[in-house]
């Protein structure tokens, strides 16, 4: 165990209400690219395609979005050791909740109950109408898309359909932000894993805990925007470091 990891474990040893805050970097070892890393999504797709104004106004953008969503947005990606370590922390009774910016569902796939997760940026499971809000069955919409409907409309009002991923310019889901804020108010430590900590308002969540003087551990491959306020920063891969850290504080 490195000196930094041992120090992080010492800081967390007495914590009983640890928040885990995750970003796209926790899922890269499951084969899902992040946004800003060297193989990140921004090296292949334009961020503008994820802006709600463009999605609403431009049919070509919607057509591209559906072609990304179907047949499977994340292929056959499976949870890795870092997702499993979050479950271990929960089983040890030390997790207050996991706040994620991810939309891939891998925390749930690893076995973390839905009520332990706040999905700040939505998820890729659902599809809803932007006008009337009606949810639509993804399997049914996929069938329509397979049959050649490249820009499916709402069954009820004819409005634009969109996956329940939060696009740039959309408000965050109220219930999720409320749960994340509730946990942030009660947490006695936070571990941020695989996030550049550069996307707001999400990054306010770990920042609030750190600002109170509670322990803030960052695990990331590369720098983050909040490195200067961290209690300790562990440089490296999430699926290696998080299991080691969780193992050290739950043994
Ligand atoms: P980001 O791309 O800004 O930052 C990810 C960070 O993780 C980078 O600093 C990168 O160097 C680091 N990293 C990559 N692989 C790592 C690994 N194996 N171990 C440790 N660190 C690793 O991502 P973010 O901070 O989550 O930005 C937020 C946005 O990314 C959110 O809006 C989120 O919805 C979106 N996003 C999610 C997914 C997903 O659900 N898996 C994928 C791409 C983007």
Image (spheres, helix red, strand yellow):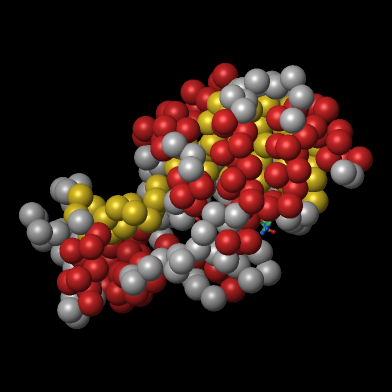
Query: In the rendered view, does 223 fall on the left or right side of 62?
Result: right
Q: Residue furthest front?
A: 251
58 vs 214, nearest the viewer: 214
For the point 49% across and 39% down, the residue is: 112
Q: Relative to 189, say whether 142 is above or below.
A: below
Residue 10 makes an appearance in the image? yes
Query: In the rendered view, does 31 fall on the left or right side of 154?
Result: right
How far across and how far down the image is residue 149, in percent? 18, 76
Residue 206 makes an appearance in the image? no
Q: Relative to 192, say whether 26 is above or below.
A: below
How far across and how far down the image is residue 218, in percent? 73, 42
55 vs 22, nearest the viewer: 22
Q: Residue furthest left?
A: 156
Q: Relative to 58, say whether 147 is above or below.
A: below
The quarter holding residue 80 reads bottom right
For the point 46% across and 66% down, the residue is: 76
Name the image quarter holding the C terminus. top right
Task: Name the quarter showing ligand 1.
Answer: bottom right
For the point 49% across and 52% down, the residue is: 106
**What is the count of numbered marks?**
0
37 vs 139, nearest the viewer: 139
For the point 68% across and 27% down, the residue is: 189
Name the image quarter holding the N terminus. top right
Q: Relative to 56, say whether 171 is above or below.
A: above
Q: Residue furthest bottom?
A: 148
How far across and how far down the image is residue 131, in percent? 18, 51
Query: In the rendered view, does 221 fall on the left or right side of 94?
Result: right
How far across and how far down the image is residue 159, in percent? 15, 58
């Amino acid at each position: 165990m490195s000196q930094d990891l041992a120090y992080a474990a010492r800081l967390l040893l007495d914590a009983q209400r640890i928040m885990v805050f995750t970003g796209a970097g926790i899922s890269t070892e499951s084969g899902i690219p992040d946004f800003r890393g060297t193989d990140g999504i921004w090296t292949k797709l334009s961020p503008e395609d994820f802006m709600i104004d463009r999605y609403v106004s431009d049919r070509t953008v919607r057509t591209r979005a559906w072609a990304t969503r179907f047949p499977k947005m994340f292929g056959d990606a499976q949870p890795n050791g870092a997702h499993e370590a979050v479950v271990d922390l929960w089983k040890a009774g030390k997790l207050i909740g996991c706040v994620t910016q991810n939309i891939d569902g891998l925390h749930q796939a690893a076995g973390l109950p839905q009520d332990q997760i706040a999905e700040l940026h939505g998820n890729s499971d659902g599809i809803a109408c932007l006008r009337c809000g009606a949810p639509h069955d993804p399997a049914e919409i996929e069938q329509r898309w397979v049959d050649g409907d490249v820009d499916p409309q709402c069954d009820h009002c004819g409005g634009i359909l969109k996956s329940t991923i939060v696009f740039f310019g959309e408000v965050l889901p109220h219930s999720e932000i409320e749960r994340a804020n509730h946990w942030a108010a009660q947490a006695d430590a936070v571990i941020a894993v695989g996030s550049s900590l550069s996307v707001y308002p999400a990054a306010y969540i770990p920042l609030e805990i750190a600002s109170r003087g509670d322990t803030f551990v960052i695990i990331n491959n590369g720098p983050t925007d909040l490195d200067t306020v961290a209690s300790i920063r562990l440089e490296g891969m999430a699926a290696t470091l998080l299991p080691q850290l969780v193992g050290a504080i739950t043994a």
